[in-house]
Image: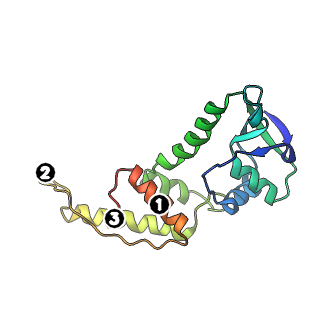
Amino acid sequence: MTQVKITLLNFYPGNARRGDIDLVADSLKINGQYKPIVVNKGTKAPDLANTILAGNHTTMAAQRIGWKTIDVHWVDVDADTARRIVLVDNKANDAATYDLPELTELLGDGPLAGTGFTQDELDAMLEAMDHQSDDLDDGGVGEDFTTEDFDLTVQCESAGQRDMLRARLVSEGFTVD
């Protein structure tokens, strides 16, 4: 791992991911940089020399809070491999899910600052788990379980947020109208 001047790095062209830079900046302020960004050396793809393959938003957040350098892990890959790394780094995060009881236990073990979660989100998770428990107590799942449609309305702050949520739900196997 090497400290590199941020001004020497390039953002991956056409990166479709839109991250929450404020959330990442808050984490960097509280937790520091706990994993390096991944940057292509570019000997196999000169057009992608010094290009960030994973950590574009971490770098943007570091710039926002005034950092001049950032920890880098160097790779040397061709353009096609670089593209695949960018895509899988984004998709792997989308495909991940949470074990809600374990997550709420972790969140309940200390202050929320620097976790990316708010008290309102924790309260909503606890309430959802409480409702799920009530449904099971009422015989919601048994030997004669059948699939039913349940309507859910979600308010998003932007079309982009709506599209990302829709994509995430579809990737997790939900049918979204």
Q: In terms of depth relative to the viewer, which is nearer, 175 or 145? A: 175
Placement of 133 over or under 41, stated as above or below: below
Q: Quadrant of residue 149?
A: bottom left
Q: Secondary structure at mark 1?
A: helix
Of marks 1 and 2, the one in the foreground: 1
Q: In terms of depth relative to the viewer, which is nearer, 71 or 17? A: 17
> Where is the N terminus found, in terms of image quarters?
top right
| Residue at x 75% of width, y 50% of height | 59
- Name the colouring of the figure: rainbow
Q: Is residue 23 left or right of residue 170?
A: right
Q: Earlier in the sequence, mark 1 or mark 2?
A: 2
Q: Quadrant of residue 39?
A: top right
Mark number for residue 177? 3
Q: Kindly identify the amino acid type of the residue bearing the numbered disc 3.
A: Asp
Q: Residues within 10 Å of mark 2 (few under 14, many from 20)?
A: few
Q: Secondary structure at mark 3?
A: loop
Q: Which residue is mark 2?
A: 143
Q: Kindly identify the amino acid type of the residue bearing the numbered disc 1.
A: Leu
| Residue at x 40% of width, y 68% of height | 127
Placement of 57 over or under 152, stated as above or below: above
Q: Residues within 10 Å of mark 1 (few under 14, many from 20)?
A: some
Q: Which residue is mark 1?
A: 165
